[in-house]
Image (tube, rainbow, N blue to C red):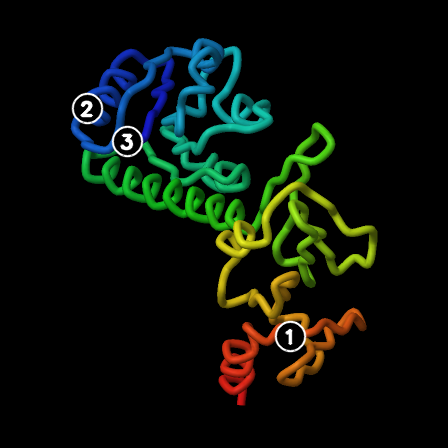
Amino acid sequence: MIRVIAIDDEPLALRQLEMYISRVPFLELTAACNSAAAAGPFLESADAMFLDINMPDLTGMDFIKSLPDPPAVVFTTAYSEFAVEGFRVNAVDYLLKPFSFNEFLSSCEKLKEYLEMKEALSASREDTILHFKADYRTVSIDIARIVYVEGMGEYIKIHQDDAGNPVVVHYSLKHLLDQLPRDRFIRIHRSYIISKGHIADASRTDVRLDNGKTLPVGEVYRPAFAGYLSSLT
Protein backbone atom coordinates (compact mmCIF):
# COMPACT_ATOMS: atom_id res chain seq x y z
CA MET A 1 0.00 0.00 0.00
CA ILE A 2 1.31 3.44 -0.98
CA ARG A 3 0.58 6.12 1.62
CA VAL A 4 -0.12 9.46 -0.05
CA ILE A 5 -0.83 13.08 0.82
CA ALA A 6 -3.14 15.18 -1.37
CA ILE A 7 -2.34 18.91 -1.38
CA ASP A 8 -4.42 21.52 -3.20
CA ASP A 9 -5.70 24.95 -2.13
CA GLU A 10 -8.86 24.58 -4.25
CA PRO A 11 -11.56 22.68 -2.27
CA LEU A 12 -13.15 21.07 -5.34
CA ALA A 13 -9.79 19.95 -6.74
CA LEU A 14 -8.81 18.53 -3.34
CA ARG A 15 -12.11 16.67 -3.09
CA GLN A 16 -11.59 15.22 -6.56
CA LEU A 17 -8.13 13.98 -5.56
CA GLU A 18 -9.61 12.32 -2.47
CA MET A 19 -12.25 10.55 -4.55
CA TYR A 20 -9.74 9.42 -7.17
CA ILE A 21 -7.36 8.13 -4.50
CA SER A 22 -10.18 6.14 -2.87
CA ARG A 23 -10.73 4.32 -6.19
CA VAL A 24 -7.13 3.11 -6.52
CA PRO A 25 -6.65 -0.15 -4.56
CA PHE A 26 -2.95 0.34 -3.82
CA LEU A 27 -3.26 3.91 -2.50
CA GLU A 28 -3.98 4.93 1.08
CA LEU A 29 -4.80 8.57 1.82
CA THR A 30 -2.73 9.76 4.78
CA ALA A 31 -3.89 13.38 4.70
CA ALA A 32 -5.75 15.87 2.51
CA CYS A 33 -4.33 19.38 2.95
CA ASN A 34 -5.29 22.80 1.58
CA SER A 35 -1.74 24.13 1.82
CA ALA A 36 1.83 22.88 1.66
CA ALA A 37 2.48 24.04 5.22
CA ALA A 38 -0.42 21.95 6.52
CA ALA A 39 1.18 18.81 5.06
CA GLY A 40 4.33 19.13 7.18
CA PRO A 41 3.24 16.91 10.11
CA PHE A 42 2.33 14.05 7.74
CA LEU A 43 5.49 13.90 5.65
CA GLU A 44 7.31 11.25 7.69
CA SER A 45 4.45 8.78 7.27
CA ALA A 46 3.92 9.37 3.54
CA ASP A 47 5.45 7.60 0.55
CA ALA A 48 4.22 10.11 -2.02
CA MET A 49 2.35 13.36 -2.63
CA PHE A 50 -0.13 14.62 -5.18
CA LEU A 51 0.88 18.26 -5.06
CA ASP A 52 -0.64 21.34 -6.66
CA ILE A 53 1.97 23.84 -7.84
CA ASN A 54 0.21 27.20 -8.00
CA MET A 55 -0.74 27.88 -4.36
CA PRO A 56 -0.57 31.08 -2.29
CA ASP A 57 2.07 31.63 0.42
CA LEU A 58 4.15 28.58 -0.51
CA THR A 59 4.00 27.09 -4.00
CA GLY A 60 4.20 23.36 -4.49
CA MET A 61 7.47 23.78 -6.36
CA ASP A 62 9.07 25.81 -3.57
CA PHE A 63 7.72 23.36 -1.01
CA ILE A 64 9.29 20.32 -2.65
CA LYS A 65 12.60 22.16 -3.09
CA SER A 66 12.64 23.02 0.63
CA LEU A 67 12.48 19.38 1.75
CA PRO A 68 15.82 17.61 2.38
CA ASP A 69 14.31 14.17 1.74
CA PRO A 70 10.96 14.62 -0.01
CA PRO A 71 8.57 11.78 -0.75
CA ALA A 72 7.85 10.93 -4.37
CA VAL A 73 5.73 13.59 -6.00
CA VAL A 74 3.14 13.82 -8.75
CA PHE A 75 2.45 17.47 -9.56
CA THR A 76 -1.09 18.59 -10.37
CA THR A 77 -1.61 22.01 -11.95
CA ALA A 78 -3.56 23.97 -14.53
CA TYR A 79 -0.38 25.59 -15.85
CA SER A 80 1.60 23.59 -18.39
CA GLU A 81 4.62 25.92 -18.20
CA PHE A 82 5.62 24.28 -14.91
CA ALA A 83 6.14 20.87 -16.52
CA VAL A 84 9.85 21.20 -17.29
CA GLU A 85 10.64 22.58 -13.84
CA GLY A 86 8.61 19.75 -12.32
CA PHE A 87 10.79 17.12 -13.88
CA ARG A 88 13.91 18.98 -12.80
CA VAL A 89 12.98 18.22 -9.21
CA ASN A 90 12.53 14.53 -10.11
CA ALA A 91 8.75 14.51 -10.17
CA VAL A 92 7.37 11.08 -11.00
CA ASP A 93 4.65 12.57 -13.19
CA TYR A 94 2.81 15.76 -14.06
CA LEU A 95 -0.99 15.94 -14.29
CA LEU A 96 -2.48 18.90 -16.15
CA LYS A 97 -5.87 20.00 -14.81
CA PRO A 98 -8.56 19.06 -15.52
CA PHE A 99 -7.53 15.42 -15.66
CA SER A 100 -9.67 12.32 -15.89
CA PHE A 101 -9.59 9.32 -13.57
CA ASN A 102 -7.84 7.28 -16.27
CA GLU A 103 -5.11 9.90 -16.52
CA PHE A 104 -4.83 9.90 -12.73
CA LEU A 105 -4.65 6.10 -12.67
CA SER A 106 -1.88 6.16 -15.27
CA SER A 107 0.13 8.47 -12.99
CA CYS A 108 -0.55 6.13 -10.08
CA GLU A 109 0.87 3.21 -12.03
CA LYS A 110 4.00 5.24 -12.76
CA LEU A 111 4.23 6.11 -9.08
CA LYS A 112 3.89 2.47 -8.07
CA GLU A 113 6.55 1.40 -10.57
CA TYR A 114 8.89 4.16 -9.39
CA LEU A 115 8.56 3.25 -5.70
CA GLU A 116 8.98 -0.48 -6.39
CA MET A 117 12.14 0.22 -8.38
CA LYS A 118 13.46 2.50 -5.64
CA GLU A 119 12.81 -0.16 -3.02
CA ALA A 120 14.47 -2.85 -5.12
CA LEU A 121 17.57 -0.70 -5.64
CA SER A 122 17.73 0.06 -1.94
CA ALA A 123 17.42 -3.61 -1.04
CA SER A 124 20.07 -4.52 -3.61
CA ARG A 125 22.45 -1.95 -2.16
CA GLU A 126 21.74 -3.13 1.39
CA ASP A 127 22.54 -6.70 0.38
CA THR A 128 26.09 -5.63 -0.50
CA ILE A 129 26.79 -4.19 2.95
CA LEU A 130 27.57 -6.27 6.03
CA HIS A 131 27.31 -4.77 9.50
CA PHE A 132 29.40 -5.96 12.46
CA LYS A 133 29.74 -4.94 16.09
CA ALA A 134 33.31 -4.10 17.03
CA ASP A 135 34.56 -2.23 20.11
CA TYR A 136 31.07 -0.95 21.00
CA ARG A 137 30.49 0.46 17.54
CA THR A 138 29.05 -0.73 14.25
CA VAL A 139 31.43 -1.40 11.36
CA SER A 140 30.01 -1.54 7.82
CA ILE A 141 31.84 -3.56 5.18
CA ASP A 142 31.11 -3.39 1.46
CA ILE A 143 31.48 -6.96 0.21
CA ALA A 144 32.70 -5.65 -3.15
CA ARG A 145 35.88 -4.53 -1.38
CA ILE A 146 36.64 -7.81 0.40
CA VAL A 147 39.74 -9.60 -0.94
CA TYR A 148 39.83 -12.42 1.59
CA VAL A 149 38.72 -13.25 5.11
CA GLU A 150 40.86 -15.04 7.66
CA GLY A 151 39.42 -17.07 10.51
CA MET A 152 41.08 -16.77 13.90
CA GLY A 153 39.16 -18.90 16.39
CA GLU A 154 36.14 -16.87 17.50
CA TYR A 155 37.23 -13.89 15.38
CA ILE A 156 37.59 -13.12 11.70
CA LYS A 157 39.98 -10.70 10.00
CA ILE A 158 38.54 -9.02 6.91
CA HIS A 159 41.14 -7.90 4.38
CA GLN A 160 39.92 -5.27 1.93
CA ASP A 161 41.26 -3.89 -1.33
CA ASP A 162 42.35 -0.56 0.13
CA ALA A 163 45.46 -2.20 1.60
CA GLY A 164 44.72 -0.59 4.97
CA ASN A 165 44.48 -2.36 8.29
CA PRO A 166 42.17 -5.37 8.19
CA VAL A 167 38.97 -5.25 10.23
CA VAL A 168 38.82 -7.72 13.12
CA VAL A 169 35.40 -8.67 14.49
CA HIS A 170 33.94 -11.34 16.74
CA TYR A 171 32.27 -13.57 14.15
CA SER A 172 32.49 -17.08 12.74
CA LEU A 173 33.85 -17.84 9.29
CA LYS A 174 30.99 -20.28 8.62
CA HIS A 175 28.36 -17.71 9.51
CA LEU A 176 30.01 -15.16 7.26
CA LEU A 177 30.14 -17.61 4.35
CA ASP A 178 26.36 -18.07 4.66
CA GLN A 179 25.94 -14.32 4.13
CA LEU A 180 28.30 -13.92 1.19
CA PRO A 181 27.13 -14.51 -2.41
CA ARG A 182 28.43 -17.95 -3.45
CA ASP A 183 29.02 -16.80 -7.01
CA ARG A 184 31.58 -14.28 -5.73
CA PHE A 185 33.26 -16.02 -2.77
CA ILE A 186 34.64 -19.49 -2.08
CA ARG A 187 36.10 -21.16 0.98
CA ILE A 188 39.52 -22.67 0.25
CA HIS A 189 40.69 -23.57 3.75
CA ARG A 190 39.30 -23.97 7.24
CA SER A 191 40.80 -20.51 7.89
CA TYR A 192 40.21 -18.69 4.59
CA ILE A 193 37.43 -17.41 2.36
CA ILE A 194 38.54 -15.61 -0.79
CA SER A 195 36.92 -13.37 -3.36
CA LYS A 196 36.92 -15.10 -6.74
CA GLY A 197 37.36 -11.75 -8.44
CA HIS A 198 40.70 -11.21 -6.69
CA ILE A 199 42.38 -14.45 -7.76
CA ALA A 200 45.56 -13.69 -9.73
CA ASP A 201 46.61 -17.31 -10.30
CA ALA A 202 45.94 -20.63 -8.62
CA SER A 203 46.84 -24.27 -8.47
CA ARG A 204 45.25 -27.21 -6.73
CA THR A 205 47.17 -26.45 -3.54
CA ASP A 206 47.51 -22.67 -3.32
CA VAL A 207 46.09 -19.37 -4.52
CA ARG A 208 47.83 -16.07 -5.19
CA LEU A 209 45.56 -13.05 -4.85
CA ASP A 210 45.96 -9.79 -6.75
CA ASN A 211 47.23 -8.07 -3.61
CA GLY A 212 50.23 -10.42 -3.66
CA LYS A 213 49.05 -12.64 -0.80
CA THR A 214 49.43 -16.41 -1.32
CA LEU A 215 47.10 -18.69 0.63
CA PRO A 216 46.98 -22.48 0.94
CA VAL A 217 44.08 -24.57 -0.31
CA GLY A 218 43.08 -27.04 2.40
CA GLU A 219 42.86 -30.70 1.46
CA VAL A 220 39.16 -30.90 2.31
CA TYR A 221 38.40 -27.94 0.03
CA ARG A 222 40.55 -28.98 -2.94
CA PRO A 223 37.91 -30.95 -4.89
CA ALA A 224 35.42 -28.04 -4.81
CA PHE A 225 38.12 -25.51 -5.64
CA ALA A 226 39.44 -27.67 -8.48
CA GLY A 227 35.90 -27.87 -9.81
CA TYR A 228 35.64 -24.09 -9.75
CA LEU A 229 38.97 -23.72 -11.60
CA SER A 230 37.81 -26.25 -14.21
CA SER A 231 34.63 -24.27 -14.77
CA LEU A 232 36.71 -21.26 -15.77
CA THR A 233 38.28 -23.16 -18.67
Quadrant housing the N terminus: top left
In this rendering, the answer to whether 219 lies above or below 91 is: below
Left or right, residue 165 beside residue 215: right
Left or right, residue 185 beside residue 150: left
Q: Residue at x 51, y 28 (%)?
A: 70
Q: Residue at x 33, y 25 (%)?
A: 3
Q: Which residue is mark 2?
A: 22
In this rendering, the answer to whether 7 lies above or below 147 is: above
Crowding around mark 2 (Cα neighbors within 10 Å: few <14, some 14 to 19, many 20+) is few
Crowding around mark 3 (Cα neighbors within 10 Å: few <14, some 14 to 19, many 20+) is few
Disc number for residue 1: 3
Disc number for residue 217: 1
Callouts 2 and 3 close, C-beta under 8 Å: no
Q: Which residue, as the protein is rendered here, is positioned at the far left?
A: 23
Along the line of sight, which residue is nearer the eye, 63 or 205? 205
Residue type beneath disc 2: Ser
Q: Which residue, as the protein is rendered here, is positioned at the far right?
A: 164
